[in-house]
Image (cartoon, rainbow, N blue to C red):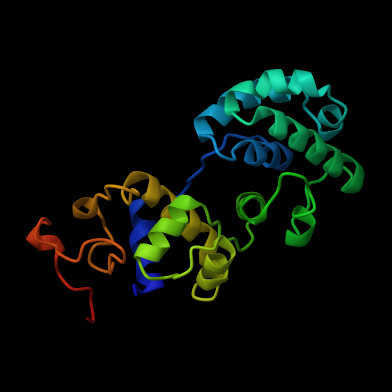
Amino acid sequence: MANIDAVYDLLDASYHPNIEFIESKSTYEHLIAVILSAQTTDRQVNQVLPKLFAKFPEPGDLAAADRSEVERIIHSVGFYRVKAKNIIAAARAVHERFHGQVPCDLDELLTIPGVGRKSAHVIRGAQFGLPAVIVDTHFSRVVRRLGLAESADPEKIEYAIAGQLDERRQYRFSMTVNLHGRDVCHARKPRCAACVLLGVCPRIGLPDALDDLPSKRKAAPPGA
């Protein structure tokens, strides 16, 4: 099992201080973008956002929108019918129940249509600076290979990481681990030879042999 603080420090030093996958101008826009991002790429979401918010700039506007028009605008993101239904309902919840303001409370966020635990934590961390462990497929893969979590269940992973890491580090850790999973620790062919974590990673679920890796990267982790 890797030391989570050592992992944090290595990744923190390796990635840009500001990691943002979604382009938004407000907490409300970020909420809608996060709902749209399910099972699609951030690039696709970012492409439709300007047109969507030009037409429906405020929660009340989208809440009253014709669903077919919303579907037409977001068609390229995939699952557009379900997503159109969800973002209209989410806008209505923000407009009517939360008086136009996206809540920061986790339980309240989870009452908004289209928002699960992962999405709620994205909002809490990105928009409110609150503790947030964001478990997606990249994060799950990396932390399990590091031995920081055993279960494949996202909620169990969330609690496992939250129990090991200082709250002030959780959101930054989530973002750097996610980016590391996208850039280096790929599902099928992880680029271990290029990985800054190789010295501290037990490579759980990956081949034990390191013969194919540069000798300078085979050193045991400090204190081992």
Q: Quadrant of the N terminus?
A: bottom left
Q: Position of residue 173 (x, y in %)?
A: 47, 60
Q: Quadrant of residue 27?
A: top right
Name the side, left or right, on which 14 lies relative to 75.
left
Q: Quadrant of residue 74?
A: top right
Seen in the picture, residue 1 relative to 116 is either above or below; the reply is below
Q: Position of residue 9 (x, y in %)?
A: 37, 65
Seen in the picture, residue 155 relative to 79 is either above or below; the reply is below
Residue at 77% from the left image edge and 61% from the top image edge: 107
Residue at 48% from the left image edge and 46% from the top image edge: 18
Residues 94 and 82: in front is 82
Number of numbered discs on residues: 0
Q: Position of residue 62 (x, y in %)?
A: 81, 29
Name the side, left or right, on which 65 lies relative to 205.
right
Residue at 58% from the left image edge and 22% from the top image edge: 76
Name the side, left or right, on which 211 lies relative to 26.
left
Q: Quadrant of residue 207?
A: bottom left
Seen in the picture, residue 201 relative to 33 is either above or below; the reply is below
Residue at 77% from the left image edge and 45% from the top image edge: 113
Q: Position of residue 185 (x, y in %)?
A: 32, 52
Q: Quadrant of the C terminus?
A: bottom left
